[in-house]
Amino acid sequence: MTAHLSAATIRSLTQDIVTTHQALEGPLLPILHAVQEAFGYVPQDALPVIADGLNLSRAEVHGVMSFYHDFRPEPAGRHVLKVCRAEACQSMGTDALAEKLKQRLGIDWHGTTKDGDVTLEPVYCLGLCAQSPAAMLDGELYARLDDDGIDEMLGGIGK
């Protein structure tokens, strides 16, 4: 779904999700995942509905949502580029690589290009430590990235 939904629609759909999941043990994370799957992000209008449904404060729900970096407070671009920021990748030059990506895309971490095409996110390990630096574009892993690898990776999305 997209961001063009009304606040009332978001609240209604979120209430359905809460009702479906609230009987689970520890339902907050499954609810947040379901909301993000439904909308593509976790809208601010959903947070009070979740809090009320689980008898939590809005601050508790927001705290959990903001702690886990996979939950987005805004819609992502059509493509999501995650760049590993863990120590192994840093030791192999990911900082310089990340700067090149940010310059090339014209955005910073958690930003989305003006055309809505790419969202850039830091992650703290993709499990490719022996093949660093690494990134993931739309779920596809890229290892041993260098300038040519960036061109190849971004070539498929027209950047």
Image (cartoon, rainbow, N blue to C red):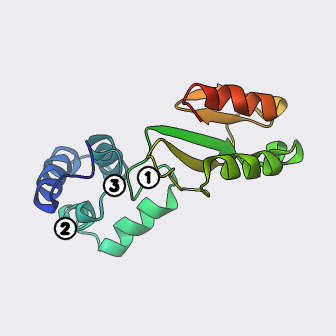
Q: Nearer the viewer, residue 140 or 59?
A: 140
Residue type at mark 1: give it: Phe
Mark 3 vs mark 2, CA separation in Å: 16 Å
The vertical placement of 122 against 156, above or below, is below
Q: Secondary structure at mark 3?
A: loop
C-beta proximity under 8 Å, tags 1 and 3 = yes
Does label 1 or label 2 sit earlier along the sequence?
Answer: 2
Position in image of residue 35 (x %, y %): 28, 48
Q: Nearer the viewer, residue 17 or 138?
A: 138
Q: Nearer the viewer, residue 132 or 68?
A: 132
Q: Quadrant of the C terminus?
A: top right
Residue at image location 24% in from the left, 60% down from the top: 46
Position in image of residue 68 (x %, y %): 50, 55
Within 10 Å of the Cα at label 2, are there few (<14), some (14-19), or many (20+) other Cα atoms? some
- The residue labelled by disc 2 is 52
Residue type at mark 2: give it: Asp
Is residue 142 in view from this perspective? Answer: no
Is residue 34 in view from this perspective? Answer: yes
Residue type at mark 3: give it: Val
Residue at image location 66% in from the left, 28% down from the top: 153
Position in image of residue 78 (x %, y %): 43, 38
Numbered circle sitting on residue 42:
3
Does label 3 or label 2 sit earlier along the sequence?
Answer: 3
Within 10 Å of the Cα at label 1, are there few (<14), some (14-19), or many (20+) other Cα atoms? some
Within 10 Å of the Cα at label 3, are there few (<14), some (14-19), or many (20+) other Cα atoms? many
Q: Quadrant of residue 156?
A: top right
Mark 1 vs mark 2, CA separation in Å: 19 Å
Q: Residue furthest right?
A: 91
- The residue labelled by disc 1 is 71
Q: Which is more foreground, mark 3 or mark 2?
A: 3
